[in-house]
Amino acid sequence: MRILVTGGAGFIGSHIVDRCIAAGHEVAVVDNLREEGGGKEANLNAGVHFYRADVTDEEALARIFDEVKPEVVSHQAAQHSVSVSTRNPQLDARINVFGLLNVLTNCTRVGTRKIIFASSGATYGTPTRLPIDEDTLQRPESPYGITKMVAEHYLRYWHTAHGLNYTALRYGNVYGPRQDPNGEAGVIAIFTKRFLAHEGVRIDWDGEQKKDYVYVTDVARANLQAVTRGDNDIFCIGTGQPISVNEIYKTLAQLTGYEPEITRSPKRAGDIYQSYFNVSKAERLMGWKSEVSFEDGVKAVWEFFK
């Protein structure tokens, strides 16, 4: 099957590409390789046809769709930082909303069968109940969460109006090899780099804020399964196990035998105190569940960055 992965040189996208190629699919990648976006040439699988372009570039994306004529699009390209979205909501909306509309328009134009979309647990904001499931009320508290929620509505509309099938995957906090340790969105990667350098770490709030940390290869496998399953539906993709920032620190300290100095900082804008998933729907309807334990995942990140 011909699959186009937007953001396919990025952290999550490149792992999806690897899974799709291993499964025998023909894969093309669109990525702008901008530093702030996280795409890197080093992440590109040698078996892909690579196009360096931005999903907001209408002319470039149209040419790519004309050449690839994808049967399935995995749309991973995004402005992915909550804090960046609060500082620059216009940028966030341009990439996450206009970029999606550009992709959807071209899917319809060339007859793409399905789009798989990277949504987010940030669409829920502070959850009304825990664990979160697909029916939990969405009340996003950041521009990033708003654009991801809006995108889901566009997917539903596009299916109704144009017949394009979709699967939206609401990711938990994804971590693993290739995550940028210099950015703002990956506490495990950031901590790992600082532990390796024997530098201090910053812990915001009281460190007891808990999230659902899901390993990147599990997320990639969910995307691969969505190629043939889960049509016109939305799924929470996580482990169902809440892990605090303090627990991440302790796990790395036990793994490395090093306890760096902690600098305490206030709550970040848009940060949520507790958020974790009930993932039974994905298991029931897509046959998916996470397989990598938190301890094994952190060890793999440590080995990668080491």
Image: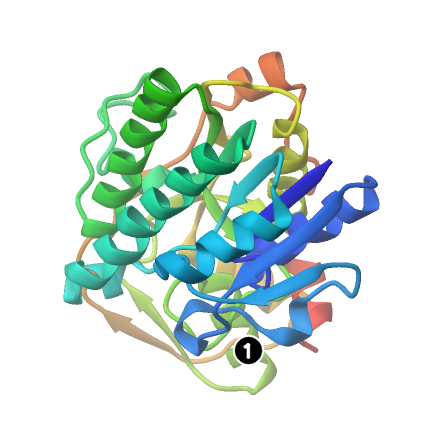
Say which quarter of the image contains residue 269: bottom left
Could you say which is closer to the camera, residue 189 or residue 142? 142
Check the picture and name the quadrant holding the N terminus.
top right
Q: Is residue 257 at all visible to an observer of this figure?
A: no
Q: How many marks are shown on the rendered structure?
A: 1
Q: Residue at x 69, y 40 (%)?
A: 2
Residue 277 screen position, x and y as percent? 44, 29
Classify residue 17 as left or right of residue 78: right
**Mark 1 = which residue?**
193
Classify residue 126 as left or right of residue 213: left
Could you say which is closer to the camera, residue 172 or residue 92? 92
Say which quarter of the image contains residue 87: bottom left
Q: Residue at x 43, y 68 (%)?
A: 37
Residue 104 screen position, x and y as percent? 40, 38
| Kind of element beneath mark 1 | helix
Classify residue 218 as left or right of residue 243: right
Check the picture and name the quadrant holding the C terminus.
bottom right
> In this rendering, is residue 246 above or below 113?
below
Badge 1: few (under 14), some or many (20 or more) residues near its Cα, within 10 Å?
Answer: many
> In this rendering, is residue 80 above or below 221?
below
> In this rendering, is residue 203 above or below 133?
below
Q: Is residue 284 at all visible to an observer of this figure?
A: yes
Look at label 1 and name its amino acid: Lys
Rendered image coloring scheme: rainbow
Q: Residue at x 53, y 48 (%)?
A: 65
Residue 68 screen position, x and y as percent? 63, 49
Residue 252 screen position, x and y as percent? 59, 65
Q: Residue reaching furthest top?
A: 284
